[in-house]
Amino acid sequence: MKPERGKLTIVGCGPGGAEYLTQQALTAVAEADLLCGPRFLLDLFPEAQGERVVTGPDARQVAALILSRMDECRVALLVTGDPGLHSLAGPVARLLGRERVQVVPGVSSVQLAFARLGLPWENARVFSLHGVSEEEAELVLGALATVSTAAVLCSPAWTPGKIFGVLRNTAGHRRAHVFWDLGRPTEGRMAGTVTELAGRFEGPGRSVLILTEAEE
Ligand SMILES: C[S@@+](CC[C@H](N)C(=O)[O-])C[C@H]1O[C@@H](n2cnc3c(N)ncnc32)[C@H](O)[C@@H]1O
């Protein structure tokens, strides 16, 4: 997919390792005049010639920057995983108008976590604990305990350890698999029941937690 003037190209960059980049992502980034995104994603494209601007998680700020440049140059916004899953891509596309956006799909961290387990995920429910209020987190944690297969995007505020602390009363028997740094040389994982892990394992905020009904 080629970036165009007057349109934003949102590029799903996969979980973070260069080998999970698609050919479409490489082409879009190689041909963009301006690359926006977090530093660790910009660094995945050392060969790209476009101007680089490090952007943060504030969708309004990102959209304002892109709007100010997109008519004069071909802009690519780099996001982690797939742009369709709990991504900055959603609010940025809403602010710009969907007709002004094209999307390059990417490998999601959730996809990769299920692949590591060798499990299908068509019946899984995916939850995010990113930027949620206490009330929203309570709803997510309540729903989590009721579905048989769940994936949770953890966050610095909601680490795996904090989630286990809440779930130990309602879902202590469930099997938990935590993955961090998926697709990178520092990739790691931990597994056990919620009860076994609660109080013993904190885990990084940037993790995917998979909850299954029983021993897999
Ligand atoms: C804002 S969400 C973006 C999700 C992304 N759109 C996707 O499809 O993976 C960020 C969260 O995704 C998860 N995540 C993204 N990359 C990851 C990786 N390489 N390893 C583990 N978790 C990751 C973590 O839960 C992180 O806190």
Image: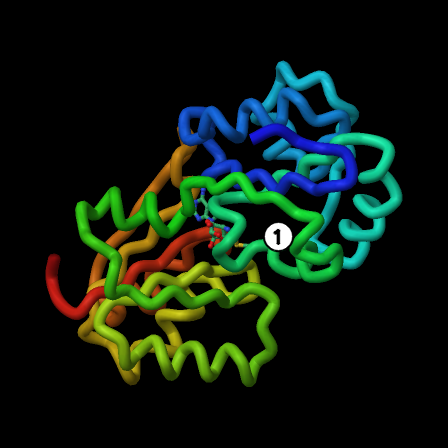
User: Who is closer to the viewer here, 16 or 99?
Assistant: 99
Q: Is residue 196 visible?
A: no
Q: Which residue is mark 1?
A: 89
Disc 1, SS: helix
Residue 152 image position (x, y, % from top left)? 40, 63
What residue lies at 41% left-to-right and 31% top-to-bottom?
20
Residue 114 image position (x, y, % from top left)? 27, 50
Q: In the picture, residue 71 is in which quadrant? A: top right
User: Who is closer to the viewer here, 72 or 63?
Assistant: 72
For the C terminus, the quadrant is bottom left
Query: Image check: 111 left or right of 137?
Result: left
Residue 104 image position (x, y, % from top left)? 53, 39
Q: Is residue 47 visible?
A: yes
Confirm or reject: label 1 Cβ below 8 Å from ligand 1: yes
What residue lies at 53% left-to-right and 80% top-to-bottom?
136
Q: Is residue 48 above or below residue 148?
A: above
What residue lies at 65% left-to-right and 39% top-to-bottom?
9
